[in-house]
Every structure is written in structure tokens, then in C-alpha cells.
Image (cartoon, rainbow, N blue to C red):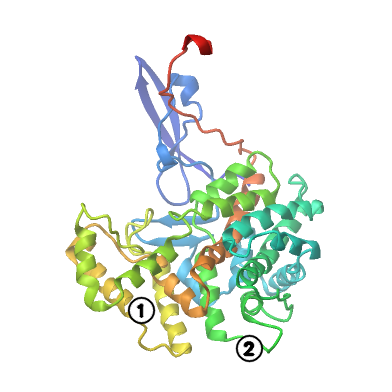
């Protein structure tokens, strides 16, 4: 990847009587950055930034977020345009290659993904090694990490051809692996992929078909799930993406890097937010109880928090939530749920969040997790599968970010620094003298 950062001046830092100058760069959009790579050499000091919320860890051309304006772009294209007009594999191609594919390019890409959907037959043995009540995400971490033991011909990160094969395999096999994790958790036989179906329809069939009867794919439900996948594909340098990049910076194979990303995503503060939002709606139960819970949410001394509102990045309305709200209604209408109590609670909470002075001032707008939990439940997925579906979609972003990192000549192995506050140098005291 060739750098596209442009010089934008410099910043002078005066410390301990010495002035040092550091270059400032600007990207295509967003805040300017101060290049502090020589900061320690020049000043003898480190910068301190817990969570790296004020630090750009890399240069990337994949995803742009403007949290203040509520903007999310994939390769420059607004997320709602893609969700409304594109499909999973076309957006996947866009994230990986940088441009929307021409018809023949999309056909070749679709063919490459479809021909990799099956997994090695011996991989099924991994599933039988897990307890029946194992969490699907625990299974995902283990099975995806094990892929490198089965596909040795695509683990050489220095070979562009092997990297391409690994990318195709990872995108193609993730739905199969995820569906197998679901089937194992409910005690049903695995369903092999069907190459005559599109990506998302194939996944739905692998999850919900059984050998005893035919399964007919509902296009409305598949379209909603396809939108969920697109909306979750990438989200800049979040915790799991940063984990993938950090693991990849050491030269680890792509399957190990994606397994690391899945493990990071499993955290409830990251990938489990939609499940938490659904649990909150169930706890509220009915519209008439909303005032009680809103009052509790405003009380700093009450531990209750409204889940699915606000976002660490978006200080305005989450652009993904608008798409998800529409898809949620379409799904509920398609399956005949006209008066879903969870949806009624959700709609009333949304209205309050957009009108109540407390929520408006604090910019606690509904985010994508607010609607996606209801939608996934309506599609028939249990809550423990929500994060698995998130991982399936985010695999595209992870693998695109990993590929970009590998091709970046300026990339170095990740090595954050620290401020040490422990004991200073002291002598060892023998056990008998302590």
C-alpha cells in the first residue's frame, strides 16, 4: 500500500528546555495527525494514551468514520447506499480490492468464494470434542484457529497468491463454520453448503434446514440478514480489528489472526452489545414500565444503564441504525409479528431518546445494536449466536485490514509502551530472611 498522507505543517514541542519539531500530516478526511515516531528519540519521553483513543496506529484506506456527523464510509461509499443497493459479496470485494467490481470481476470472485465453502471433513472432529453446552463463540475461536493445521498451502504471508487463497477461504468457510457451531449447539446434524445459493441464503439454509424436510429460503429474511452482515463488515480500528492487526504484525498466519479477532470480539463491551440490548428490552417488558427505567437510567447512583444507546465513536445518530430499523420492521412484517412487545418497547425508547432533553444533551442516540438484536431474534437465532454472526460479517473487514497491513511497507511489529509505577530496583531477600 502506497502512503497517501499529505504534509500539513509541523508541531513544536518544548520539553525540559529543549524544543523538538514533529511533522503533521493529513489524510483524505478526518483530523490531522502528528507524527511522533521520533518523539522518544527527540525528547526521552513517551506519550500516554490509554486505549489509544487519540492515537492513529496505522494508515488505512478502507473505512472512514465521522462520529460527530454520523458518517460511515466503506472505501468512500456511504454505508446506507451499500446496504440498500448492494449485497454481501459485492461489498466484500469492495473492501478487499478498493473498488466495486465489474460484472466479470464479481462473477470470478463469487465463483472463488463458492468453491471454498466446504471445510475439511476431519474438521468435524473438532466439534465433537467440545461439550454440548459449549458457547458457539468458544467453538469459533478454536475451529478457526485450527484452520492453519488443515490449509498449509495458504499460510505463507509473503506469497501474494497464498494470501489471496487465504482471503477467499476465510470469507467462504466462515458461514460453514458458524452454521456448524450453531447446529452442534442444538444437537442437529450438520448441513453441507449448497453452491446454487447466494452467500447469505446458503448460510440461512445451513443453519435452519434439516434432513427430514425441505427448507425454503425466505428472501425478505435473507435480505435483512445480508444487510446486517454488510453493516457489520468493518468499523475502522476497533478492538477486534486492532487485535487482528497486532497479531498480524508479528507475521502470524491469517487464520491465527482471525481467531485472535474472534476472541477479542467475544468481549461483552464489543461484540455482545446487541445481546445486552435485547436482554434490557426483555427486562423492561412493556411500554408502561419505560418511565421507571428511564428514571433509573438518569440516576447516576443507579447501576442500571440503557443498552443500545450512544456509541463510543458516534456522537450523532448511528448511520447503521437507520438501515437496521427499516430492516427490523420488514422482518417482523414478513413473519407475521405485528405487535411484538420488544419492538413496542424499542420504538418508545427510541422516541424518548430522540426527544428527551437528557438524552439529546448527552447524545445518547439509538445505535445499530438497539435494532439488530430484535431482528436476529425474529430470524430465529438464539442470543448466544449473535456474536457469531457479528464475527462472520466482520471477517471481511478483518481480512481486508490484515491484507492492507501486510502490503504496507511502513508497518512494524506492534509494541506499545507503558509508564511503569511498580517497585524500583531492589535486592532479592532469601526465604528465611523475609
Mark 1 sits on what residue? 343
Q: Is residue 263 visible?
A: yes
Q: Quadrant of residue 412?
A: top right
Residue 179: horizontal and vertical position, in percent? 64, 70
Residue 188: horizontal and vertical position, in percent? 66, 76
Q: Is residue 84 left or right of residue 316?
A: right
Q: Is residue 102 above or below residue 413?
A: below
Q: Residues within 10 Å of mark 1 (few under 14, many from 20)?
A: many
Query: Cα distance, mark 1 to mark 2?
Result: 26 Å
Check disc 2 and report its element: helix, strand or loop.
loop
Q: Quadrant of residue 284?
A: bottom left
Residue at the spot 70% in from the left edge and 75% down from the top edge: 189
Of callouts 1 and 2, which one flags the residue occurring earlier in the amino acid sequence?
2
Residue 36: horizontal and vertical position, in percent? 47, 31
Residue at the spot 43% in from the left edge and 20% down from the top edge: 43
Mark 1 touches mark 2? (CB < 8 Å): no
Q: Is residue 280 above or below residue 63?
A: below
Residue 183: horizontal and vertical position, in percent? 64, 72
Q: Is residue 41 above or below residue 176?
A: above
Residue at the spot 76% in from the left edge and 58% down from the top edge: 165
Q: Residue furthest front?
A: 432
Q: Is residue 98 visible?
A: no
Compare residues 180 and 326 and report the one nearer the observer.
Answer: 180
Check disc 1 and report its element: helix, strand or loop.
helix
Total residue callouts: 2
Compare residues 303 and 118 and report the one nearer the observer.
Answer: 303
Compare residues 73 and 387 and report the one nearer the observer.
Answer: 387
Q: Residues within 10 Å of mark 2 (few under 14, many from 20)?
A: few
Q: Is residue 34 left or right of residue 99?
A: left
Compare residues 329 and 92 and report the one nearer the observer.
Answer: 329
Mark 2 sits on what residue? 216
Q: Quadrant of residue 313?
A: bottom left
Amino acid at each position: 500500500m502506497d502512503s497517501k498522507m499529505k504534509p500539513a505543517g509541523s508541531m513544536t514541542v518544548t520539553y525540559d528546555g529543549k524544543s523538538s519539531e514533529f511533522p503533521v500530516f493529513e489524510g483524505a478526511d478526518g483530523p490531522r495527525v502528528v507524527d511522533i515516531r521520533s518523539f522518544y528519540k527527540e525528547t526521552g519521553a513517551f506519550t500516554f494514551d490509554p486505549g489509544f483513543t487519540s492515537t492513529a496506529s496505522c494508515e488505512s484506506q478502507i473505512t472512514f468514520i465521522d462520529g460527530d456527523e454520523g458518517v460511515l464510509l466503506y472505501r468512500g461509499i456511504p454505508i446506507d447506499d451499500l446496504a440498500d443497493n448492494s449485497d454481501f459479496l459485492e461489498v466484500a470485494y469492495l473492501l478487499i480490492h478498493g473498488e466495486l467490481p465489474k460484472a466479470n470481476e464479481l462473477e470470478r470472485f463469487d465463483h472463488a468464494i463458492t468453491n471454498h465453502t466446504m471445510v475439511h471433513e476431519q474438521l468435524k472432529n473438532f466439534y465433537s470434542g467440545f461439550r454440548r453446552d459449549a458457547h458457539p463463540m468458544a467453538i469459533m475461536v478454536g475451529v478457526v484457529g485450527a484452520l492453519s493445521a488443515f490449509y498449509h498451502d495458504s499460510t505463507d504471508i509473503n506469497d501474494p497468491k497464498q494470501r489471496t487463497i487465504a482471503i477467499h477461504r476465510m470469507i467462504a468457510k466462515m458461514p460453514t463454520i458458524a452454521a456448524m457451531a450453531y447446529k452442534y449447539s442444538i444437537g442437529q446434524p450438520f448441513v453441507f453448503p449448497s453452491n446454487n445459493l447466494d452467500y447469505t441464503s446458503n448460510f440461512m439454509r445451513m443453519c435452519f434446514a434439516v434432513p427430514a424436510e425441505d427448507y425454503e429460503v425466505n428472501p425478505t429474511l435473507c435480505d435483512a440478514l445480508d444487510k446486517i452482515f454488510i453493516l457489520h463488515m468493518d468499523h475502522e480500528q476497533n478492538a477486534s480489528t486492532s487485535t487482528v492487526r497486532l497479531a498480524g504484525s508479528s507475521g502470524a498466519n491469517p487464520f491465527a489472526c482471525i481467531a485472535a479477532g474472534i476472541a477479542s470480539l467475544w468481549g461483552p463491551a464489543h461484540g455482545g452489545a446487541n445481546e445486552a440490548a435485547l436482554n434490557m428490552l426483555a427486562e423492561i417488558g412493556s411500554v408502561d414500565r419505560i418511565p421507571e427505567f428511564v428514571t433509573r437510567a438518569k440516576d447516576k447512583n443507579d447501576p442500571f444503564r440503557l443498552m443500545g444507546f450512544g456509541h463510543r465513536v458516534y456522537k450523532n445518530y448511528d448511520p447503521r441504525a437507520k438501515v437496521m430499523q427499516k430492516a427490523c420492521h420488514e422482518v417482523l412484517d414478513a413473519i407475521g409479528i405485528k405487535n411484538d412487545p420488544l419492538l413496542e418497547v424499542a420504538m418508545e425508547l427510541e422516541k424518548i431518546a430522540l426527544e428527551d432533553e437528557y438524552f439529546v444533551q448527552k447524545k445518547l442516540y439509538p445505535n445499530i445494536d438497539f435494532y439488530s438484536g430484535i431482528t436476529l431474534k425474529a430470524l430465529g437465532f438464539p442470543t448466544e449466536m449473535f456474536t457469531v454472526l457479528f464475527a462472520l460479517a466482520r471477517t471481511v473487514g478483518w481480512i481486508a485490514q490484515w491484507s492492507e497491513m501486510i502490503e504496507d511497507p511502513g508497518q512494524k511489529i506492534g509494541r506499545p509502551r507503558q509508564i511503569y509505577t511498580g517497585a524500583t530496583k531492589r535486592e532479592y531477600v532469601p526465604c528465611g530472611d523475609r
